[in-house]
Amino acid sequence: MDKKFLIIDSRPYGLFSIFLHTVDNIKWAKDNDYIPVVRWAPGRRDSNYGRRGTIEYRDTKNAGVLDKNNFLTEDAPPSYGNTPGLKHCQCLYWAPEGHHGEKNPWRYYFEPLNEYTVEQAEQAPHDVADIFMVGDLDDDLDNKFLIKSVHLYEPLILWDILGTDKEQGHRQEVNDVIKENIKVREEISLKIEDFYKKHFSQDKKTIAVHVRGTDKKLEYPHKALPIDAYKIAIQNYLDSSDEIVDLYIASDNNEAIGEIIKDFRGKVGKIIIYPSVRMPKYFSKDPICLTSATGPKHGEEVLIETILLSKCSHLICTDSNVSAGAMYINPNMSIDYLNRKYGSR
């Protein structure tokens, strides 16, 4: 087969972290005449491990790093077993029994990108990626796609350019890659449409709030905001609007949802919550994906909730990959980005 493939694997992180790095790699493949296929096999925890020149870049800010594309190699192998300090190195949503009759975690949720199988790609000339690849190792946002720093792999460009004249073009560009390449499995799409038709109003707006708690408090330089920050933002929106709106709440914990319901029952048209497994407390030690509650079903719930967020007209959020996913799926949704208001970034 006279073709070269890019096999895109997973990393041991949340669903929309690996979804967005997959989108990033799809774009890179198309731009560089590769055929992308998604395997979501185990990937590296440390995305710079074995990458020649990264220590020099870190110490000197010299952008001449040798392994610019950072493919998986024998010197930078995937993490098949457990890694100290991390509970899972396999894709966090993988299960030995599979899901929806599939063994590849990508296929639990999405259709193949094209007519080629993973097996065909493995037997042909190919490279393997499990990280964000696009852009030079510098601070120039113009040569990046999703990630601000391909050395550190954080944060998303999105959080820097929200509210600027670059935001809409960027969100639309990412949306174009998603729409042209990625299709949610029919079984999941039907669940989303059924829930949407049953619970979302056709005659009034639905605003959304996504509350990211649990281990968010441990992320640096990000900031876990108090639940009150989200409640103030909801109230401010209601005060500025003459129309009654519905409220869709998505979160990784039940405490935040309970507090918002208590404060806004009767102040909005109705409150909508998708039935998902969540952690009990806002500051629970771990997110669900690092507990025994994770697996294919949890990943499906995250995907469904993110798409439901994207169907709303306005989103109140912090810098979460789930919120980013919703913003890219619906590039026209207005955003109330709380980090900037509360001094996080």
Image (cartoon, grey):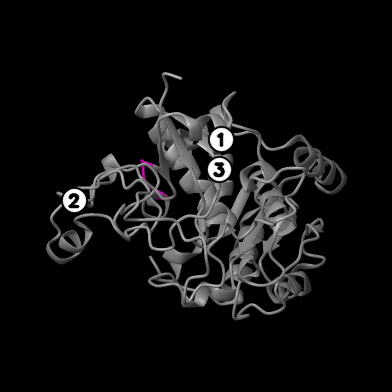
Figure check: 282 above or below 111 = below
In this view, which residue lies farthest toward the top?
2
> Mark 1 to mark 3: distance in Å?
7 Å
Of the two numbered discs 3 and 2 on the same chain, state the one appearing first in sequence.
3
Which residue appears at 29% of the width and 56% of the height? 151
Q: Which residue appears farthest toward the right when viewing the image?
A: 198
Q: Residue at x 49, y 31 (%)?
A: 123
Where in the figure is residue 334, as x and y percent of width and height?
55, 47
Q: Is residue 33 above or below residue 195?
A: above
Q: Is 163 contained in the magenta span? A: yes
Secondary structure found at label 2: loop
Q: Which residue is mark 2?
A: 65
Contact (Cβ within 8 Å) of mark 1 with mark 3: yes
- CA gap between label 3 and label 2 equals 27 Å
State the residue position of label 3.
39
| Relative depth, front residue between 4 and 56 | 4
Magenta range is: 162-166
N-term mark: 1 or 3: 3
Q: Residue at x 56, y 72 (%)?
A: 87
Dot placed on the residue nearer the N-terminal end, 1 or 2: 2
Q: Identify residue for label 1.
A: 118
Asked whether, in this view, residue 312 is left or right of residue 20, the answer is right
Image height of 215 relative to 74, above or below: below
Q: Amino acid at mark 2?
A: Val
The front one of 267 and 290 is: 290
Q: In this view of the protein, can residue 340 be seen by the observer?
A: yes
Judge whether residue 26 is colored magenta. Answer: no
